[in-house]
Image: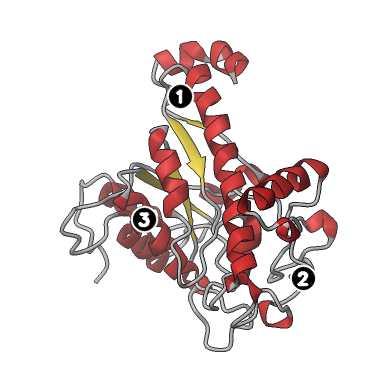
Amino acid sequence: MRSFHMEFRSLSEEGLISAIEVGLGASGELRYPSCPEKMGWRYPGIGEFQCYDRYMQKNLRQSALARGHLFWARGPDNAGYYNSRSHETGFFCDGGDYDSYYGRFFLNWYSGILIDHVDQVLSLATLAFDGAAIVVKIPSIYWWHRTASHAAELTAGFYNPTNRDGYSPVFRMLKKHSIILKVVCYGPEFTVQENDEAFADPEGLTWQVMNAAWDHGLSVSVESALPCLDVDMYSRILDTAKPRNDPDRHHLSFFAYRQRTPFLLQRDVCFSELETFVKCMHGEATQNFVD
C-alpha cells in the first residue's frame, strides 16, 4: 500500500485520485470467501464457514477455553455445504442451532475475527495512504435475507439474523478509521419475487446497510451492479442516492457508474436520459425527471 501511494502520489496531490478503495476480502469486499465458485459454489447456495485452518482453530479453541466451554472449540457440524439451502441444515433452519448458546458463541467469535481483520488492515492503510480518503466495499449478500437466520450472510461473516443487527459492529470499526462505505445497488429485476426459492431481498438489505451506515455517521457511496439503460433504473438509483422525505437529508457521497466498455456505443442508449440523470445526481435538475 505504501509503494502504491508513493508511485501515484502526484496524481493524488493533483486531485486526479480522490479516493483509494482497499480490498478486505474475497473479490475486494469485506467478507470471508464463503462462496467460491472455484469450489463449486453456485447461487443461491448458503456457502460454508471459513474457520477450519489451524490458525482459526487455535483462536477458536482459545475463545472457547476463555468462556469455560472447551467443547465449543469446533465449527458447526450441521451447517451444510456450499450449495445447501438453509432449511436443509440443522444449523440454519428456523429454530436451528444458529440461535443456541453454542451458535451465538460461535457466530460472535466468527464475525469478531473479521472485524479484527478490518481493524488491522485499515490501521496500516491509514498510515500508508497518509490522509487520503479510503473506500471499503461491503458485499450485497441478499439471498436468504427473508429467512430467520440469513444463512449466506452468516457464513460470509455478518452476524445478521432477523433478531440482531449484524452490520453496526462492522460500521463502528469503519467509522473509527473514517472510511467511505461502498454499497452495491441492484436493478428492478432483483426485487422480491413471490416464488423466489432463494428468499432474496436485495432492496431490503440495501436499506438496512445504508441506514445503519448513516446512523454511525459514515459517508456512503453506491456502485451499480448492472448496466443502467432505462428510466426506471435511473429513477431507482436517484431514490437510493437521495431518499425522498428524509428529515436528515442523507445522500450519497458518490456513485460508481459501472458499465461495459462499449456501453456508450450501443444504439439503445438514450443520451438525453443519461444527461438528465447526471444533472439530477449533481442537483442541477429536479429528481422527478420522468412523468
Q: Quadrant of the N terminus?
A: top right
Label 2 environment density (alpha carbons within 10 Å; few <14, some 14–19, many ≥20):
some
Q: Residue at x 64, y 43 (%)?
A: 25
Tag count: 3
Calculate the distance from the C-alpha at mark 2 to the C-alpha at mark 3: 29 Å
Q: Residue at x 49, y 79 (%)?
A: 192
Q: Specify the label residue 193 is tagged with.
A: none
Tag 1: amino acid: Ile
Tag 2: amino acid: Asn
Tag 3: amino acid: Ala
Label 1 environment density (alpha carbons within 10 Å; few <14, some 14–19, many ≥20):
some
In the image, residue 146 sits, relative to residue 181, either above or below, namely below
Q: Residue at x 42, y 47 (%)?
A: 171
Discs 2/1, front = 2
- Residue 264 vs residue 236, the one in the foreground: 236
Q: Quadrant of residue 152?
A: bottom right
Where is residue 196 shown, x and y percent of the image? 59, 83
Asked which secondary structure carries label 2, the reply is loop
Q: Which residue is mark 1?
A: 17
**Left/right of residue 261 with respect to residue 271 in the rendered view:** right
In the image, residue 51 sits, relative to residue 25, either above or below, namely below
Discs 3/1, front = 3
In the image, residue 28 sits, relative to residue 133, either above or below, namely below
Q: Residue at x 61, y 53 (%)?
A: 67
Q: Specify the label residue 212 is tagged with.
A: 3
Asked which secondary structure carries label 1, the reply is loop
Q: Which residue is mark 2?
A: 83
In the image, residue 136 sits, relative to residue 248, either above or below, namely above
Calculate the distance from the C-alpha at mark 3 to the C-alpha at mark 1: 28 Å
